[in-house]
Image (tube, rainbow, N blue to C red):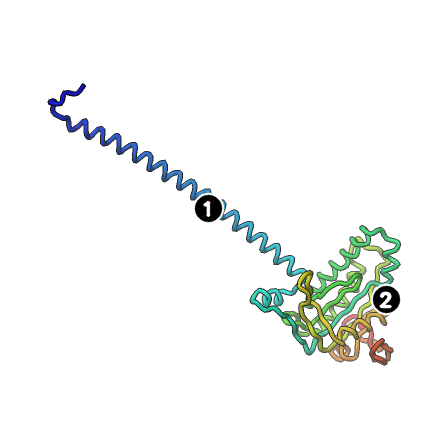
Amino acid sequence: MTDPHEPLDPLKGLDRENRILTRRLKRLEDNVRQAEAFQDSTSVLLSKLVRELEDERAKSQRLLLNVLPQRVIDRLTAGETVIADRHDDVTVLFGDVVSFTQISSRTPAPQLIQELNRLFSSFDAVCDATGVEKIKTVGDAYLVIGGLPGSATDHVSAAAETALGMLDAIGTTEGIGDEWQIRIGLHRGPIAAGVIGTTKFAYDVWGDTVNVASRLEVAAEPGQILVSNEVARGLEGRFGLERRGSIDLKGKGPTETWSLTRAT
């Protein structure tokens, strides 16, 4: 027991205060370390979430680009709700697989889809190289437009190069049968273009120019590129053109046509 009359030792008091302060300091350091650890883990988690968000955004962008052109995506992102444009001078290319119904009737579905995918993927590569824009495929039909904003300026030549490249792809694409052939029609003129639908929406084109290109494709022989006078005038002197004469096109009547061959 401490004698109350015994004088206090100031060193003992300082030692006690020092021990108390040391314990408090240790607790504070522990709290700081815990806070730093929490902050680090939160930062790691936040960084992971940001990366995952960016990955998902990139995936969504890639999916959108399979449906819509980049310029249309940009306009929708900017807040436009109605995409509807008129283009006064474009070249429309319509391609179609010859006797696809017969091919599909004797080819197992997985093989049929695989071969069609290989062929159309080759066509996609041709479009990328020539600077035209693939609009869509409908069954075994393949629709391309030259002259839309952001595509090749000399759209008639670009569409012609695309058509010739598609014919080449028939003979060079590996893994497709010898029976695969296509017909192609080309026409030049105005079109309307825009996005339709709210679910499973699509970018599409309409107009007489599209219809004529489709009719020319139907009138073409297997392995032939049939073009209108409007297209032939834009290609004269730069590509091989053989006069096919007047053909009665459904909905158009007698129409002068030419067969496109290799560049001269």
Q: Residue at x 67, y 68 (%)?
A: 195
Q: Is residue 154 left or right of residue 25?
A: right
**Can you say whether 49 is above or below 198 in the image?**
above
Direction top: furthest residue: 1
User: Looking at the image, which is closer to me, 71 or 198?
Assistant: 198
User: Looking at the image, which is closer to me, 134 or 198?
Assistant: 198
| Circle 2/circle 1 CB separation < 8 Å | no
**What is the quadrant of residue 161 in the picture?**
bottom right
Q: Is residue 214 visible?
A: yes
The x, y position of residue 58, in whole percent, is: 59, 55
Mark before the other along the chain sequence, 2 or 1 = 1
The x, y position of residue 145, in whole percent, is: 71, 70
Q: Quadrant of the C terminus?
A: bottom right
Mark linked to residue 33: none
Distance (Cα) linking label 2 and label 1? 63 Å
**What is the quadrant of residue 95 in the picture?**
bottom right
The x, y position of residue 89, in whole percent, is: 69, 77
Q: Amino acid at mark 1?
A: Ser
The residue singled out by tag 2 in the image is 222
Q: Amino acid at mark 2?
A: Pro
**Crowding near the residue tagged with mark 2, few <14, some 14–19, many ≥20 C-alpha atoms within 10 Å:** some
The x, y position of residue 172, in whole percent, is: 78, 58
Q: Is residue 262 left or right of residue 49?
A: right
Mark linked to residue 43: 1
**What is the quadrant of residue 241 in the picture?**
bottom right
Q: Nearer the viewer, mark 2 or mark 1?
A: 1
**Crowding near the residue tagged with mark 1, few <14, some 14–19, many ≥20 C-alpha atoms within 10 Å:** few
Q: Give the total of numbered labels.
A: 2
Q: Residue at x 79, y 64 (%)?
A: 141
Q: Is residue 25 left or right of residue 14?
A: right
